[in-house]
Amino acid sequence: MNLPAKFSFEIPEPILAWMGSAVKRVELSGRFIFYLREIFQQMFRRPFRQKILFQQIEFIGNQSVFIILLTGFATGAVFGLQIGGVFTVFNAEGMIGGATGIALATELAPLMTGFLLTGRAGSAMTAEIAIMKVNEQVDAMEAMGVHPIHYLVVPRVLASMIIMPFLCGIFMFIGVVGVYSIGVAVFHVDEGVFYEKLINLVKPADIMTGLRKMLIFSFIIAAISCRTGLAASKGAEGVGLATTNAVVRTLIFILLADFVISYIEVRWLS
Amino acid sequence: MIYFQGVSKAFGSHVVLDELDLDIPKGKITFILGKSGEGKSVTIKHIMGLLKPDKGRIIVDGFDISDYSKDEVRLYRRKFGMLFQHAALFDSMTVLDNVLFPLREHTVMSKKSMLSRANEVLEQTGLPHIKRKFPSELSTGEKKRVGLARALVAKPKILLYDEPTTGMDPLVCEMIDKLIVEVGNTEKELTSIVISHDLKAALATSHNIIMLYKGKVALSGSPDEFRSTKDPIVRQFFSGKIEGPMEFF
């Protein structure tokens, strides 16, 4: 049998490129896992930076309240209009409060609050840290023996996890106020019926489901935003790119997490 | 004080430090010179523990820092002060808060003692009047001086200057060079390491000069030794001419 003296096999260029990109993604995922581990480790290390924590709570919370109130009311009102239109066909306008209440508590409020805070607070976190990174301020911190994750990331993650679920609660409440306004003013629903259906249909567990989701979303927002900021490079262009990337990545991760949490709750917990 | 023993470092196939041996004396001003890409910044990053050598040992104060863990490196860095090329002041803090930062992070001093120490270094760098200003309100020279005050405040054993005069006008350059000498004279125990391209400043202000070329020491010695050397690489660097034995990439 004649065998070739030397066997050579060339991998086609597109497959090589795809393999290179896959390896890079695996590497990035690995780094992100190490980053998450570092956040948890640094959370329990001294000193506890309460001044920065309160500054961040004020920045994320107080300065986001107006946009949350506005969007919450508008979302509730529009959703009420749409649902009310459908319920009118079945003469069931009284259900408007209960139906929209459940949707707001379990899905709309955490998702909308997550999206809003990604744009409002997450992008600001990324931009601030990215500017510090490209101006060597993060390097200066490292040079002074201060861990950037301890100083910059941990207070932001904790502040987000404290205040964002609270903002989500505000969104839920003001969303119901929006639905109520439309129900009473447009569909002439009796106030008593509205409250009765709302209280009967929306259980505390639904509200807890929404808040639990928001707690996870808030971690995602802060962790991804800070990480993308810390990885920024190439001056002003890099800051812009990092901010855009942070928003896009956070939104994708929020949607993925929402699906996973909803799946777990529906299939296993309910 | 600081010894590099056969230190090699490569990034991919690009060898930056090639079995580098160098010796930085304690309590002196040492300039590390070399053209861009010769490994000056990589050397300083090794001294600070920001990079680990592929091969060789780095001995600082009698301790081999090459094998330090991340936490050990962070503790070790507390003996350093560093003046960055663009000062790297924290934008969100006032000058005073910037200067207080290392003390707040690493000491248990009372507020009064911290303020007193901060005022002392601000006086030393000639900036007692701008404590309440933010970095965006300062000139380039003032930023550098605040950066120096921040680097000095925690009484470091080693002070690193990363290209302190690059891109500055001649007056600011001279002011910074004078400050380096003044600080070196005031703090007798302080070891100052300056990364620079500025040969004139090196000859005027240093006790010791190390010139790097192709990842190795081309020449190490006093300013007088540098002035009198016949080494063609050093002579070409002195003359600033492209023609000569020095390779450009």
Image (spheres, rainbow, N blue to C red):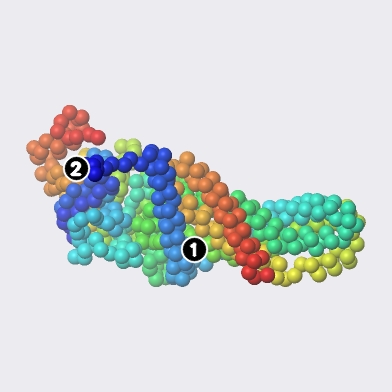
Amino acid found under the numbered disc labelled 1: Val
Quarter of the figure with residue B57: bottom left
Most extreme residue toward the top is B243
Amino acid found under the numbered disc labelled 2: Lys
Q: Residue at x 52, y 54 (%)?
A: A225
C-alpha span from label 1 to label 2: 42 Å
Q: Residue at x 69, y 59 (%)?
A: A107
Q: Residue at x 8, y 37 (%)?
A: B230
Label drawn at residue B69: none
Does residue A259 appear left or right of residue A98 in this picture? left
Q: Is residue A34 above or below residue A74?
A: below
Name the chain letter of the residue that bears numbered label 1.
A
Name the residue carrying label 1.
A154
Label drawn at residue B214: 2
Q: Using the rendered image of the protein, determine whether residue A239 is visible from the camera's viewpoint.
A: yes
Pick the quarter of the image with the C terminus of chain A.
Answer: bottom right
